[in-house]
Image: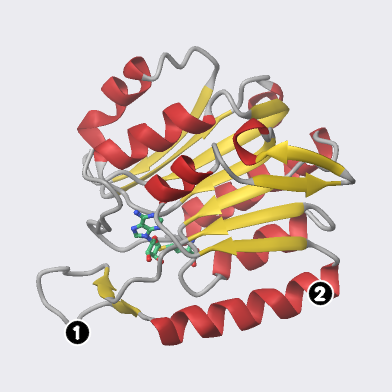
Amino acid sequence: MDEGKLSYCKGFSDHRNTFDVMVHFAEVCQRFTNGEPILEIGTRQGGSALALMNIFKKRWFFTVDPYQEFYFENDDTVPGKGTKISMDLYRDAMALLAFEAKKLETNWTHYLMTDYDFMDITRYVKISIKGKWYFSDDIKYSFVYLDGPHSTEYVKNEISYFKDKMVTGGCIVIDDCNNLDDIPKILSDCDISAMWYKQQTEDKFLLCYDPSDKMVELL
Ligand SMILES: C[S@@+](CC[C@H](N)C(=O)[O-])C[C@H]1O[C@@H](n2cnc3c(N)ncnc32)[C@H](O)[C@@H]1O
């Protein structure tokens, strides 16, 4: 694993159809869970985080994104093409999300770091939720949205970390992996036995891990 590095997205991200499916899963998940925290890896302008905040109102919500300077999407070999991830973008996204969190009474915290570092520090950081202190590594989530680095090793690492951290009725949505052919191996390496919902277009995929099978029944 290439520690703490950024990785790039192969094609256009956030296709309307997969975004809609993510939102649908979040809405169903919200009904089946009881106020446990939610988390997003990969925040960029804060579009999906904003949607999740509005669905899971008054929850604990953690977002993770290092906002290092680089160009994202379209063609990562040509600087200037695609979205520039910068500290300007970081400030705009944080302002937007802070405003919304206050309005919606969401306890939102952003971790300005990579997914790798987030998974590492959770062993040492304690968080108080509803008056009880938890090591963040022990937190169980209702909903986890993985939309940060899209290369195989990162996707696999994130799935194997979060799959045992979900409450009953919880759900992980994975937005894309650069090499779609690696998906079956990722799932078998992570020992995923619960049902997965999968939607795939020619350059984009979305997977939902639903340990309780409840949401898939409802689709
Ligand atoms: C596809 S964008 C996220 C889009 C966002 N979810 C939305 O809907 O607006 C991917 C984001 O992942 C972030 N990222 C890249 N490498 C990362 C890493 N190793 N850990 C966490 N985030 C990372 C980038 O900075 C970028 O903001």
The N terminus appears in which quarter of the rendering? top left
Percent position of residue 53, x then y: 72, 61
User: How many marks are shown on the rendered structure?
Assistant: 2
Percent position of residue 101, x then y: 76, 70
As drawn, the label of residue 80 is: 1
Counting other residues with Cα less than 10 Å from the Cα at mark 1, is it few (<14), some (14-19), or many (20 or more)? few
In this rendering, which labeled residue sits more in front, label 2 or label 1?
2
Q: Is residue 102 above or below residue 161?
A: below
* Residue placed most toward the observer, 209 or 69: 69
Outermost residue on the left side: it is 77
| Residue behind label 2 places its C-beta within 8 angstroms of ligand 1 | no
Amino acid type, residue under disc 1 in the picture: Gly
Indicate the quadrant where residue 6 lies. Answer: bottom left
Asked whether residue 215 appears in the rendered view, the answer is no
64 horizontally vs 34: left or right: left
Amino acid type, residue under disc 2 in the picture: Lys
Percent position of residue 59, x then y: 80, 52
Secondary structure of the residue carrying numbered label 2:
helix
- What's the CA distance linking mark 2 and mark 1? 34 Å
Q: Which residue is mark 2?
A: 102
Q: Residue at 57%, 47% (x, y): give it.
A: 21
Indicate the quadrant where residue 69 lies. Answer: bottom left
Q: Quadrant of ligand 1?
A: bottom left
Q: Is residue 113 above or below residue 205?
A: below
Tell me which numbered mark, 2 or 1, is placed earlier along the sequence: 1
Percent position of residue 13, x then y: 36, 61
Counting other residues with Cα less than 10 Å from the Cα at mark 2, is it few (<14), some (14-19), or many (20 or more)? few
* Residue placed most toward the observer, 47 or 15: 47
Secondary structure of the residue carrying numbered label 1:
loop
Q: Residue at 47%, 41% (x, y): give it.
A: 119
The C terminus appears in which quarter of the rendering? top right
Q: How is the image coloured?
A: secondary structure
